[in-house]
């Protein structure tokens, strides 16, 4: 499968996916990184691996339709068949959804449907729950609402800080996302 990864930040999930495609564990080729934050570290990761990236700032466009149209043009040019969201901090709009029906997945740092949206880890800590988790799901027009593909629970321990919980979530994410994509593309 020819895939594109969309990310806005550090890109540790992007890296895990990229590594798994390069090692052959996941039967896919990362054709493009799409990033909406010109200073994001994920861009360095793409450069290091010689993966082309499309970097944009939403504020330079009049509408979501406009920048998503540009993204779609790049994806088509590279024959991208599937989109993997990995910490992309924007809602996917109808322009992209209609071009890739059933072919977009996302990873979210909670046991959905609990704690959708921003700062899911902080939300879980604030709520005082005993566990949270990680979810991989198909993307629809909502915020973290599409059909769930895979989930893993993570216990929150007494001494957990935001940082320690974040670390646990990330290590689970990297494994769960790779496993899930491996199955999807096999
Ligand atoms: C991850 O926690 C992911 O679940 C969320 O954004 C974070 C991205 O982390 N959607 P990274 O950029 O992959 O390190």
Image (cartoon, rainbow, N blue to C red):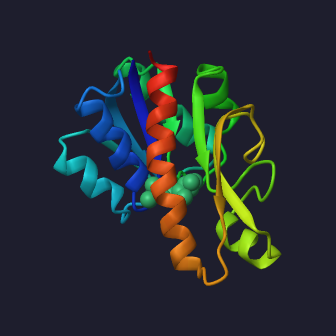
Q: Is residue 120 above or below residue 45?
A: below
User: What residue is at 28 percent from the left and 40 percent from the top?
Assistant: 19
Position of residue 34 measured from the top left corner of the image (x, y, whole percent): 42, 43
Could you tell me if residue 31 is visible in this image? yes
Instruction: Check the picture and name the quadrant holding the N terminus.
Output: top left
Q: Is residue 75 above or below residue 162?
A: above
Instruction: Check the picture and name the quadrant holding the C terminus.
Output: top left
User: What residue is at 17 percent from the left and 50 percent from the top?
Assistant: 48
Position of residue 65 measured from the top left corner of the image (x, y, whole percent): 63, 38
Q: Is residue 63 left or right of residue 170?
A: right
Position of residue 100 measured from the top left corner of the image (x, y, whole percent): 59, 22
Q: Is residue 43 left or right of residue 7?
A: left
User: What residue is at 42 percent from the left and 20 percent from the top?
Assistant: 76
Quadrant hosting residue 138: top right
- Name the foreground residue: 90 vs 77: 90
Count numbered badges in the picture: 0
User: What residue is at 66 percent from the left and 55 percent from the top?
Assistant: 133
- Name the foreground residue: 96 vs 125: 125
Could you tell me if residue 8 is visible in this image? no
Q: Is residue 118 left or right of residue 20?
A: right
Q: Is residue 11 above or below residue 147?
A: below
Position of residue 156 measured from the top left corner of the image (x, y, whole percent): 66, 70
């Amino acid at each position: 499968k020819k895939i594109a990864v969309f990310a806005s930040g550090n890109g540790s999930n992007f890296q895990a996916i990229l590594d798994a495609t390069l090692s052959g564990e996941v039967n896919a080729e990362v054709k493009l990184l799409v990033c909406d934050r010109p200073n994001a570290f994920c861009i360095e990761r793409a450069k290091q691996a010689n993966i082309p990236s499309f970097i944009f700032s939403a504020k330079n466009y009049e509408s979501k339709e406009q920048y998503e149209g540009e993204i779609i043009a790049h994806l088509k040019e590279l024959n991208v068949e599937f989109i993997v969201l990995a910490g992309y901090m924007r809602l996917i709009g109808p322009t992209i959804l209609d071009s890739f029906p059933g072919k977009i997945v996302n990873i979210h740092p909670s046991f959905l449907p609990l704690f959708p949206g921003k700062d899911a880890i902080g939300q879980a800590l604030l709520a005082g729950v005993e566990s949270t988790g990680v979810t991989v799901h198909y993307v629809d027009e909502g915020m973290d609402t599409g059909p769930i593909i895979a989930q893993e629970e993570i216990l929150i321990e007494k001494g957990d800080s935001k940082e320690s919980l974040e670390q646990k979530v990330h290590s689970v994410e990297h494994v769960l996302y790779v496993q899930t994509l491996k199955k999807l593309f096999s």
